[in-house]
Every structure is written in C-alpha cells, then in structure tokens.
C-alpha cells in the first residue's frame, strides 16, 4: 500500500492507517496485521506512561484484543489513531481502577484470617459483620477452619458432610468475602462501612 498524504504515524501516515482500519473492518486479515504492527509502538508507549513499563506488554495486548472486538463499530468520525489510543487509554484506566480495588481489598482482607489462627479482638467485629452476609453453610465452614482452626476432616465431621464439600464451602466463603470487601470499597460511604460494629 502506498502511503497517503498526512502526518506520519509510525511507518504509515494517519490516512494510511485509517485505510488499514477500514480494510481490517471489512475482514482483511493482512490489513489487520499491518494495522497492529504500525500502531503497536505508540499504544505500548501510552500504556507504559499511564500505568508502567512492567505492565505495558499485557496492556497493549489487551488494547488490541478490545480494538479488534470493537472494530466493526469504528465509524471514522475520528482517525483510527485517535480511536485506537482512546481504546488504549480506557484499558489503562480500567487497570488503574482494578489496582486500586485490589489495594483496598488487600488492606481490608487484613481483617480476615486466612490461616488457622485465633484472630485478635480488634478484627472480630468486622469479621462477624462480613460473615453474617454470606450463606450459613459457607459461613460455618469458614469459621470452623479459618477462625477456630479445625482441619478439613474435623470440620467435615462437625458438618456431617464430605471433606470436599468443606473445601468447596471455604473457597466460596472466601470468594464471597472478597466480593463484599470489593463492593464496600466501591460503594458510597453511607452504604457500607468496614469499621467495627457497622451494618449495611
């Protein structure tokens, strides 16, 4: 393809990149590969600058996955470069939000014992509040193994069920707790607090 007039973008001009996008949109796989190759460097650099270099490869890959899925909706109101970098920016913002949620979750999970140990008294009100929100069988299995320190066999005997059921209930209880904590991190302060003695 001969470069068209317009500002340079990688090895192709902006207009040539638009044409590649149009051809890729029509199902031309060669054009799609050229589109990715021509735009990868700037997408990677944006991801590295907005998030970090360590995650830039994965974020650039995720950007192109999203872009390919959304290519049918590319209308040409903006240039393909502008459209693609918007996809990259949104991918980066999603990653930054996810990292923030993970940090909040990890701080909050300090209240939840993950090994068989006796929790200190300051954790109990928060843990009790969170546990009260999950299904009783899961809650029981979690308390038996993670709060009271029973092994899975002992907990299975207490609950009169197979060991595998206890393992499953504990895993699901932990997933439920993580979901509650992440929901609390995203919710307005008036809807849920992780402070001691609070309820929704």
Image (cartoon, rainbow, N blue to C red):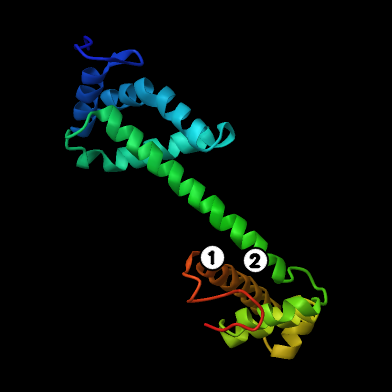
Q: Quadrant of the N terminus?
A: top left
What x and y, as percent, mark residue 193? 57, 75
- From the viewer's perspective, is residue 9 above or below residue 83? above
- Where is residue 11 drawn, in percent x and y? 34, 13
Evaluate if marks 1 and 2 touch, with contact meaning CB atoms under 8 Å apart: yes
Residue 109 seen in the figure: yes
Residue 82 versus residue 71: which sits nearer the camera? 82
Mark number, residue 149: none
Q: Is 22 on the left or on the right of 187, as rendered?
A: left
Tell me where residue 191 appears, x and y as whole percent.
48, 76
- Whether 193 is drawn above or below 61: the answer is below
| Residue at the image position 50 percent from the left and 47 percent from the top | 96
- Residue 90: quadrant of the picture: top left
Reading the image, the residue beneath label 2 is 108
Secondary structure of the residue carrying tag 1 is: helix
Q: Mark 1: give few (<14), some (14-19) or many (20+) Cα within 10 Å.
A: many
Crowding at label 2, few (<14), some or many (≥20) Cα neighbours within 10 Å? some
Side (left or right) of 58 relative to 72: right
Residue under numbered circle 1:
185
Residue 105 or residue 33, whichever sits in front:
105
Q: From this viewpoint, is residue 152 visible?
A: no
- In terms of secondary structure, where does tag 2 sit? helix
Relative image position of residue 160 (x, y in whole percent): 69, 90
Q: Quadrant of residue 39?
A: top left
């Amino acid at each position: 393809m001969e470069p068209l007039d317009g500002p340079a973008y990688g090895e192709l001009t902006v207009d040539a990149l638009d044409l590649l996008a149009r051809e890729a949109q029509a199902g031309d796989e060669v054009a799609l590969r050229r589109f990715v190759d021509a735009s990868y460097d700037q997408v990677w650099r944006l991801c590295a600058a907005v998030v970090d270099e360590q995650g830039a490869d994965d974020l650039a890959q995720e950007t192109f996955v999203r872009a390919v899925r959304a290519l049918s909706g590319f209308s040409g109101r903006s240039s393909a470069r502008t459209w693609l970098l918007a996809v990259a920016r949104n991918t980066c913002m999603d990653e930054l939000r996810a990292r923030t949620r993970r940090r909040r979750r990890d701080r909050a999970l300090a209240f939840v014992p993950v090994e068989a140990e006796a929790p200190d008294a300051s954790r109990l009100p928060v843990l009790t509040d969170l546990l009260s929100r999950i299904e009783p069988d899961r809650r029981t299995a979690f308390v038996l193994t993670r709060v009271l320190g029973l092994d899975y066999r002992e907990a299975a005997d207490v609950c009169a069920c197979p060991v595998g059921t206890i393992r499953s209930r504990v895993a699901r209880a932990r997933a439920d707790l993580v979901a509650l904590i992440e929901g609390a991190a995203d919710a307005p302060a008036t809807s849920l607090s992780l402070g001691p003695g609070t309820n929704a």
